Each structure stands twice: as structure tokens, then as C-alpha cells.
Amino acid sequence: EFSTLLLLLLGTNTIARFLLSEYKLVKRKAEAMSKAIHADRGNINHRGNHNKTDVKRDEEGQLGVFTAYEMFEYRIDYYFSTSKWAKVALLLGFTFVLIAVGAGLLAVSLEDHSISNAVWIAWTYVADPGTHADAPAGFFIRLISFSITVGGMLIFALMIGIISEYIGDKVDELKKGKSRIIESDHTVILGWNDKSLAIIQQIALANESEGGGTIVVLADEDKDELESKLASAIQSIENPLQLLGTEVIFRSGNPLMECELRRVSANTARSVVALSLDDLDPDEADSNMVRQVMALKAFDEFGGNDCHVVVEVNDVDNQELFALVAPDFAEVVVTHDIIGRLMLQCARCPGLACVLEEMMGFEGSEFYFEEWPELVCKSFYEITCRFDDAVPIGIKTSTGEVFINPENDHIIKEGDKILVLAEDNDSYEVNDGSYKIHRINKVPEIFETEQKVEKIMFCGWRRDMADMIAQLDEYVQEGSELWLFNSVPAPKRAELLKDKGNKEELITNNLTICNVVGNPIIRRDLNRMHAVDDSGKPNGREITLDQFDSILILADAVAMENGANMMSCDSRSLSSLLIIQDIQKKLYDKRKSKDPNAPPPCAPISEILDTRTKSLLKVANCHGYIMSNQIISSVMAQVSEDKDINIVLREILTADGSETYIRKVTRFVDLDEDRVLSFWDIALRARQRREVAVGYKPAELEFKDATHLIINPAEKFVPRKWSPNDMIITFALD
């Protein structure tokens, strides 16, 4: 009895204190509002503007007066919105009052007048509605029992509602991706753009040899929408995305917030890939990436671990910002600059697009660093034939310096790592070194040919057009011509080339720029192109498509600014490609009828954004194309796996250092003397010219059909018969 009374008193005291505090609060609010009303009335009387409308409002009691119900409603709403336990507290309080009042009435009505017994009986009526059927005879007792039972039913209904609402909220929260990720050694992708799916595919390919991995995507988009995009890519008939055992987890949130970075366990990740937003201006997007890097650097738990950050940057001019805010912290990949250089290289070297696509992705052979103690004290020339399933292309010293295509007498020291092209990091080993490398004939003498003047056309417009022109100016001979064919008015181009004042005026030393205004998907504009001056007036110069040495069809930035997506841009590029090829064919047939020895026109190179467009290129009979987003995604995926790869790719994809070349086999072999040689024999001869042979293309195969040979061919020691039109893929300084 004592314990029961004590519990009832404690509960009653708690409720009474709460109600008393609420009463005092209501009283203070009433007094404060009353003072405000009187002050307002005094001001009105003082001004003499107390009109009939004001008097009426005072009489009706609508100015600052509240009812008890309004205050009750306000306080309930306050507690429900500020405390997640308010509903539970209300339910417990109502249950306590029902049991206490019911027990008191039962104690009076029952014969034994026991408080503890009455409390227990009241609880059974609340917990189990069926027990009130056994209530003692008597109208008053049964009425009390019935009332307690009805109250108990309401309490359990409220409890079920609260529990259901709580579970529903938790499920919705989980669907929105609000829970924390508990992972380590995973890859975190911050942001979402048109390269995200391709990056996921490449990382999944990299994880395949390890049985899969985990990719966590944190983006400021709806989680269900992101999961739907991934599911659509997986179920796509054309180039479906294959996860290969890798798990992809999405979380919705702002990647710039430290709490969100902690939620995806960025501090325990293997690498972080920060993607630029598509819907922002390039400079604004780069500024956002600077803040992203600063947010990661300021994340205390992120510092000190082995995780590295890969950042996508749009404008090469903004690359220095990252060196200022976070030197040696983030690996920067300038997407537009890389694609611009690739377009130029591939336009001037047919077949190079297939080589780079094979080299960049994880489907074939990719770059790996590994230390081999058995090769210490060997020269780079001596290790040319030491890997049956890989091609050595460089050295990373123990101090962190990377040398691609080093000198032949470069000695490998202890702690140095060998950079190779291999199918996987565990797919190659050092052989026994039994292959003879000292009896190699000298390479044939090369007679330098004078570089000819070129005519090149850019079909479409890119925001980094000035950078592409400056790069092209370094490659071509003086007197070469660049024809810019797009829909941008000629007077506006000068302003765009200066990037609205952010760049200096473009000055070319070797190129003469000719402007043509027209629509790249309208045949009559492409049949015969007429040049205009800076004011838009014709200057008398004209040209046809069969006169160009190279034609680049660019993903048109003007169309993107007008709302075109990746597929729409690719559709425009394909239309331009078909029209250009058809016009070239008709002009060539006409010229060939007069001159049977007339050279065929150049093959256009088209920039393709969406990987799903690749299957349509066969229909369009397109042999030259650049899967720009695919290559950029592959580059970022490779750098995310090993940050040192960024140094390698930066050298290979730029004009500085060693570049990728497609050479004729006769550059290394005099076929009149040596026709049957192994690939290693060719590689050793290439070293005499300080070139690294990484693969070859037989004359009878197209590049797209020789993907298993153009990079890291098998059976390098097996002799084969070479023909004059066989091509060797090399890394060379020039």
C-alpha cells in the first residue's frame, strides 16, 4: 500500500508541477499582452485616431486576447514540434491520470478499499478490455470499469498511432538516405553529373579482381532518383552498367557540410572523387570545387589518413586555385583541357582514339606501380623484356619522382617502382630474363620530311575554344588555317575567346583563323563555306569539306546553353557527321572522275558524350570518335585508385613530355633485312629511338578490331611476320 501511494503521489506531484508551470507561463503571457493592448490603446487615444472600427475591435475582444483553448492548442503544438518525446509524455500522463482516477473511484466502491488492489484492477482494465466483464455486480462499479476500459482502448489506439508514425518516419528517413555509412576502404563520390555512372562502372571494373567493393555517392539530389538512374543504367540494353560485385550506396545531402562527410565515412575512405555540377557556370562550378576541397581539408577526422581526393575542374585557368588552398592535397583533373587535347591529337593521328580508350579504361590494360627487388641495379633498357604480361613504360623513384620513357641507362635503385601497362595489378610477374637483348640490329635511318601546311575545321563551339586553338597552334606548321564553323555570330566570338575578359586576347603564331557562321546540321550551310570578317561581312574566302586535312565535330556548347542534354548533343553531332561524310563522298566522287589518283578526304572526328551513342556510330560508319565523358571518367577512376597515375596521364595527354604516337613498323625495322621478329625485338629497337613500344596493329585489322593487340599484346616473345603497313603504338618525346 505504501509503495503504491508513494508512486501515485510522485506522479501526481510531477503532473501538478508541470500544470502549475504552464499556468504561470499563461498568466505571464496574458499580463504582457494586456499591457501591450493598453499601451496601444493609449497611443491611439493620444493621436486622436481611435475611430469606430478600433472601438468595435476592442469591444469584441479580438485585439491581443486569447482563449484557453487557443493557448492549449499553442502549447501542445510547441511541445510536439520541439520534443520528439512529447507524444510519449502525453500518452504516459493520460494513462497515469486514467489509472489514478479510476483506482480512486474503485477503492471507494470496492469492499476492501485497498489502494494497491484498486490500482492493479484499473491497470488490468486499461491493458486488457476484456477483464472488465468480471467486474463485481453494481451499476456504479461497472460504470467505472466501463469508463476505464474505454479510456484504455483510446490509450492503446494512441500508442499504436504513435508507434506507427515513428516507424513510418524512420522508414522515410532511411529511404531518403539519412543514416550513417559504416564502411572503410571504400570510394566516396561527392556530387552527381553526367560522368558519375561511367566512373562507377570503371571503379567496379577495378574492384572486380578483389571480388567487388563499395562505392558511396553523396549528392544533393533525391536518393530515390539516383537509385532509379543507376537501375536504368544496369537494365539498359545498350552498354549496360555492370557492377561486378561492387555495392553502390546513395546518400542525399550537401557534400560541403562536415556532418554529411562524416555520415558517408569520408575519413575512412580509400579515395574521394569530387564531381563538378553540370547546372553551374564553369567558373562558379570550379569555385564550388575549391570550397569542397577546403571542406575536406578542414574535416579534422579526414586529415592524416591515406585517403586522397580527386577533383574535377572545368577551366584550366582555375587549376592554380587548388595549389593555393590545398597544395599536395587534391589531385586535379581538368576535364575540358584533357578532352580538347585529345580531340586535337586524335584528329591529326587517325586511330589514336581507339588506343587511348583502350588505355584509359579498366576493361583492358591500365597503369600500375610496383616495386621489384630483383630488378634493382638493372637499366631501363634491360627490363624491356622482363615482363611477359606487362609493358614497362617508366619508373617512380623512392623520392616520388615519376619518369615516363626514361633514358636507356637509367638505373633502377632500391625503393624504385616500375610503372607498367598490365591487365591487373596481380596479373604479371618478372620472368627469368632469359630473352636475349644484346643482338639487336640498328634501326633504319629516318629522313625528315618537311611538315606541310594544314587546313583544319572545328564544327561547333566549346567554351574552352581559345585553349584548344592555342594548343593547336603549337602543333601545326606556320601558314596553317583553322576554320571555325558554328552558329555563334562573328562579332561575339572575339568576346567569347577572351572568356568575357578573363583571358588575354588570343594571338596565334602559326594559325590563320577563318570564321564561318552557319548551322552544323543544315546541309546548305556545309556545302560551301564562306568566311566572314570580325564584323560578320563576307571577306571573299570560301572552302569545301574535301579540302580539309582534319575535321573535328565538337559537342556544341551553344546547344547545351539552350537546354540540350547529352543525347541531344550527340544527336546533333551524328547529324553533322552524316551530312559531312555524304558531302565529302559526293565531292570525292566528282574529283575522282577527273583524277583517279585523287586522295580521299579526311575522316571526321566526332566528340560523343553519351556511351549509349556508341552503338549508333557503326550505323553512321564513323571510325573516328572521342568518347569524351567515358575517357574523363576512366581518368578520374584511375587516379582515384592511385593518385600517382595523375602525373602519368597528365604527361601522356599533354604536349609536355612523352605522348602517344602511332608509328609505321618501318621506323624501327628494315623489312628487307628483318621481317620475322617478335614484339620484344620491336620494343628493343624502339628503345634505340627512346620510344616505348606498348602494342601494335596488324595491317589487316582495323583499330577497333585489334583492341587485344594495340596495348600490352600477349606472347611478346613469339616471332611474327611484319608487313609495311603494320603500325606500332609508342610513347615518345616527339
Image: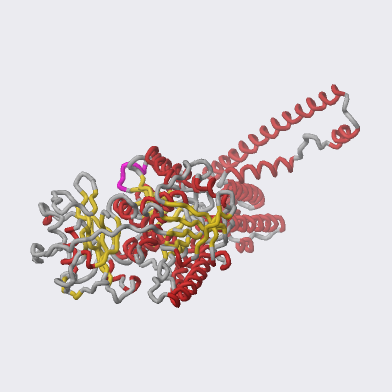
> For this rendering, which residue is in front, 370 or 340?
340
Instruction: Determine whether 595 is above or below 494 in the image.
Output: below
The image position of residue 44, as x and y in percent, is 84, 26
Residue 708: x, y in percent? 28, 71
Task: Inspect the magenta stretch and tell me whether residue 319 lies in it.
Answer: no
Vertical position of residue 509 compared to residue 192: above or below: above
Q: Residue at x 88, y 28 (%)?
A: 50
**Residue 534 location, x and y as percent?**
55, 49
Residue 302, visible in the rendered structure: yes
Q: In this view, does 522 lie above or below 63?
A: below
Region in magenta = 301-306
In the rendered image, residue 31, in percent from the top left (x then y), is placed at: 73, 29
Q: Which residue is drawn at 19% across and 68% down?
A: 679
Q: Name the image quarter holding the C terminus.
A: bottom left
Q: In this view, does 715 lie to the left or right of 582?
A: left
The residue sitting at 61% across, 45% down in the picture is 81
Which residue of the protein is positioned furthest toward the front in this rendering?
594
Q: Which of 176 and 244 is in front in this view?
A: 244
